[in-house]
Amino acid sequence: MKKILCVVGTRPEAIKMAPVILALKQEPWAQVRVLATAQHRQMLDQVLSFFDIEADIDLNMMRPNQSLTTLTGRMLLDLDAVLLEEKPDVVLVQGDTTTVMTVSLACFYHRIPIGHVEAGLRTWDKQNPFPEEANRVLTGRLAQWHFAPTESSRQNLLREGVADSDIIVTGNTVIDALLMTAERELNLGIELDASKRMVLITSHRRENFGEPFAHICRAILKLAQDNPDVQFLYPVHPNPNVKEVAHATLGECANIHLCAPLDYAPFVAAMKRAYLIISDSGGVQEEAPALAKPVLVLREETERPEAVEQGVVKLVGANYDNIVAETQKLLDDELAYKEMARGVSPYGDGLAAGRIVRVLQQYYAAQDKLADSDSEAAVEAAVEAAVEAEPA
Ligand code: UD1
Ligand code: UDP
């Protein structure tokens, strides 16, 4: 048995790690342990409960409006004891959060191999997204296995000098999770006017906090005022830097529905119901193209260029004029809309988790074989030595 510690800290990590955890649990050679740092609390718990996954260890890290350094420091200290106690053969981390970078560092100090799920995403700009670009670069320096979602993420890793043999292109497990979920009966749970189109909004990036986020909110307000026949549904991220501004700017507008973050299944229902999506989320950029929904991305650059290249995702930044103009175009121009609502899935085919599991299985099978042949050789050598030592 190999002990595999799967780490989840935030909502997107849990969504994207869930298919890997569930697949590993089917494997007789794998002892799966789940470590929740709980960098997120409610948003993590709802995903784990949806996928019927229970954390074996829960560090309960989240504090209101936590800072990056205190979160990192507290987590690193707690991880010491966990890794000493658990002694896993491998630790799997997913993505680019503080959890991922901190767990990778702790594993490195404990000489525990790391498998990085969703490896190789890069903007090559340390400030965008902040701090995620640095988190994933640092994790990439420390990981043994790099499970890259696409060929372009593989190329990024090669450019950084990662050995080709350590990179495996698997697809992104987000599509596994999406397909598993889309199969179920989905209920949005929010009353919307069935005769009206809906624009779905999410936003939470740290580099947008302050003035950029204020521009985003003003653009949404303008769009809602100009389009009273369109409904704007905005599940607001609980980060106080987002929540307070969103409610203050958009709370009073009749056709803007602000709500708490949606659980994963209702959110998938919301994406399916949406006419278009405005978001700065990484995961939504991957999911929406597979559901044939155009996405306008509230960022200057993206580490997910594939859907942009295919013309189904467009970067609009946190720029008021761009957001208003590009959204209005999609609402008014059916041809432009159809061009972006084509339904492509450049990030995966739903089979990524299985590929990750096979890599680990084959690695450990080969390692066991080597150990067996080493011990056979050792027995033979011992017998030979004993025979030679016998008196004639
Ligand atoms: C984090 C990740 C980001 C990821 C995002 C997904 C880092 C640095 N950032 O950003 O990469 O895209 O999660 O959503 O790792 N909060 C709650 N309840 C929750 C979750 C958060 O109240 O369930 C509030 C708390 O006040 C918390 C704050 O949000 O302190 C910020 O959480 P944090 O994980 O530090 O940052 P995010 O902005 O969520
Ligand atoms: N999501 C969700 N509820 C919401 C908003 C998003 O379940 O109200 C899901 C979404 O489907 C995607 C993931 O959360 O899989 C993305 O998380 P987030 O945008 O918080 O983080 P990012 O992907 O930007 O790191």
Image (cartoon, rainbow, N blue to C red):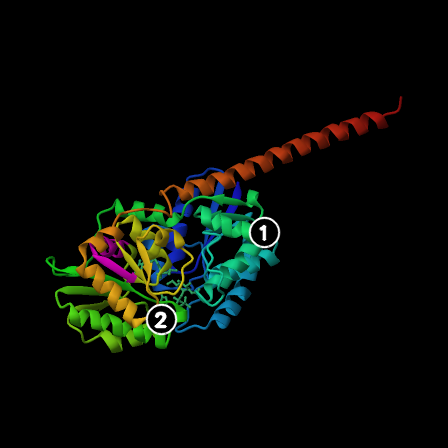
- Evaluate whether residue 25 shows in this view: no
- Name the quarter showing ligand 1: bottom left
Residue 196 falls in image quadrant: bottom left
Instruction: Report if the beta carbon of the residue with label 2 is closer than 8 angstroms to ligand 1.
Output: yes
Q: Is residue 234 above or below residue 269?
A: below
Q: CA distance from mark 1 to mark 2?
A: 36 Å
* Outermost residue, left side: 195
Percent coordinates x, y for residue 181 in the rendering: 29, 48
Q: Which mark is residue 205?
A: none
Question: Is residue 283 visible in the rendered structure shown here?
Answer: yes
Position of 365 with respect to 382 (left or right) is left
Residue nearer the viewer, 4 or 310: 310
Q: How many numbered discs?
A: 2
Between disc 1 and disc 2, whose residue precedes? 1
Q: Residue at x 23, y 58 (%)?
A: 276
The residue sitting at 25% across, 51% down in the picture is 339
* Residue labelled 1 has its Cβ within 8 Å of some atom of ligand 1: no
**Residue at 47% over, 66% down:** 131
Q: How would you classify the magenta stretch by its main secondary structure? A: helix
Instruction: Report crowding for label 1: few under 14, some 14 to 19, many 20 or more residues within 10 A (C-alpha).
Output: few
Q: Position of residue 245 (x, y in %)?
A: 30, 76
What segment carries the magenta color? Answer: 265-278
Which numbered disc covers residue 239?
Answer: 2
**In this figure, which residue is indicated by the disc labeled 1?**
161
